[in-house]
Image (cartoon, rainbow, N blue to C red):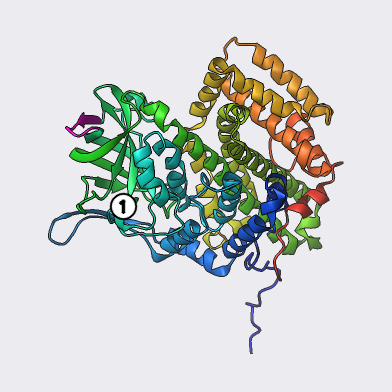
Amino acid sequence: MAASTHTVTNQPPPLVGYDVFAADPALTEGITRYIGDARLAEVREELGRLGQAAGSAHAQQWGEQANAHPPVLHTHDRYGHRLDEVEFHPSWHRLLGHAVTAGLTDAWSRPDGHVRRTAGLLVWTQAEAGHTCPLSMTHAAVPVLRAEPELAAAWEPLLTSHIYAQELRPAAEKGGALAGMAMTEKQGGSDVRANTTRAEPLAAPGEYVLTGHKWFCSAPMSDVFLVLAQAPGGLTCFLLPRVLPDGTRNAFRIQRLKDKLGNRSNASAEIEFDGRSWARRVGEEGRGVATIIEMVAATRLDCVTGAAAVMRQAVAQAVHHCAYREAFGGPLIDKPLMRNVLADLALESEAATTLALRLAAAYDGGTERDRHFLRLAVPAAKYWVTKRCTPVAAEALECLGGNGYVEESGMPRLLREAPLNSIWEGSGNVQALDVLRALQREPAALNAYLTEIGTARGADHRLDRAIKALLTELADLDGIEARARRLVERLALVLQGSLLVRFAPPEVADAFCASRLGGDAGAAFGTLPHTLDLASIVARARPVTDG
């Protein structure tokens, strides 16, 4: 009898059946840092339940199925009537329903709401990233609607509800609702002031009908949308429901769904308003950008969080693989060069997580200083953290070798998802220019940022030098626009360094400051100084399973 050649050896077990929250020290320590003692046990239990669900076999299967079966647009029924409905795989609804039930659209009304929601989003995104788009839009719509108390009273309880009600029905008949957003047009892109969608006022105060086209509409299956359009008084923000109070469908024509690089489970659409699309004004005419900016800022924090989640899952998979895979006489994790790569990746991941939690804590703080700090820190963090996500995902994939290039590993899905958050809600140049606007128009924002990083001065000589160099660069306005990316990168790195020096273990802070601020590293991952405590950094990043 011929010997079998199919005995499987030297293959790591799947990373499944573990608590995604508890397995991440940077995240668990951050929760302890920002949640008061009175609620700490409650929040840890809440996040632990979510972490166990995110690491479970069924959640991983939901993510695989939702991406293997992307949404399908149905424009008409069999008789030719307009439907404009998007059909999702049942696994999408399971993921989204679990997230809504866990409170991932509810931050504004709960104590410590932004920290617990950011931590929860960082955990649950690791199960599947695409469905977090409607979670983000729904969460971010709340502060915008507060500009109109009547609209907020009607919609905020639904948007912050822990009930997932997927059917399209009048708001009064639903226990929960989701929100989307439609700003971008094909002729303007990020330049929303070039929008051509028109809003014509009706006789009733605050009511309009819209005519126009939106090139990107996020979460087109949602119950309600925030839309920018040109009213008689200028660019204005509007609330447009999918279903009108009398139960009829609003004129909301979905032309097609985008065929995207990644984020395959999520629907992004082109839509038309045909002159009968009914909407309510939010804020004053001509103040559309100022009104909707609260939504943009909140979704930018979610971009940081989403990128941090993708990085964390990529690093967790890489470290897990290398802990079990043997080559050249021992586990890969013990090989000095692979250890250097893993430690470098782990630094990037921990720095991203720590920064996301700090931003969330500032939202919860709610002071004038917090507001000024966020004005500068959010676009800087959005620029840098989301930019780092793609190279981290690519290097982590390579740690698995050929296995990582195969779809079954899950790593290609992470790599395809990685660029999204850098593009969504304003790509790199938009964020860099927004930082320049904050520096030029809001001196208090820079003061708040300098106060924040100043709390770590004197703790690390490389951080101190980096702060001094940053101040010199801020004082030089010559060619500032062309230097904006360089400046914003330094702002983000110094902020990350200051947080790690204050809160991370010494070996993590030392390695970050040496490589990111002190210049003692190469351009690729895996070029950290060999004298650092790389083994401790890798051990800290390793996810521990029940097995």
Q: Is residue 262 visible?
A: no
**What type is the residue that disc 1 sits on?**
Ala
Q: Is residue 161 within the magenta segment?
A: no
Height in image: 133 above or below 290? below
Query: Which quadrant: the N terminus?
Result: bottom right
What residue occupies the far top of the structure in this picture? Answer: 478
Give the number of marks: 1
Instruction: Decide if residue 152 is in sight here.
Output: yes
Q: Quick one: 296 or 196, which is closer to the camera?
A: 296
Residue 301 in the image, given as x and y percentages of width and height:
54, 39
Instruction: Give 427 or 25, whichever is nearer the viewer.
Output: 25
Q: Residue furthest bottom?
A: 1
Q: Indicate the position of residue 382 as horizontal and vertical percent values.
A: 56, 35
* Residue 319 picture quarter: bottom right
Magenta segment: 198-205
**Relative depth, front residue between 151 and 179:** 151
Extreme residue toward the right, this view = 531
Q: Is residue 262 above or below residue 95?
A: above
Say above or below: 141 vs 123. Answer: above
Horizontally, residue 359 falls left or right of residue 71, namely right
Quadrant where the C terminus is found in the figure: bottom right
**Apparent side of residue 356 relative to residue 538 in the rendered image (left or right):** left
Which residue does the image show at 23% across and 30% down from the upper left? Answer: 199
Q: Indicate left or right for 171 with 434 as reference.
A: left
Q: SS of the residue at dot 1?
A: helix
Percent position of residue 522, x then y: 73, 34
The residue indicated by pointer 1 is 171
Q: Residue at x 72, y 51 (%)?
A: 37
Graded by Cα atoms within 10 Å as few (under 14), some (14 to 19) or many (20 or more), the crowding at tag 1 reads many
In the image, residue 46 lies at what x, y percent?
61, 59
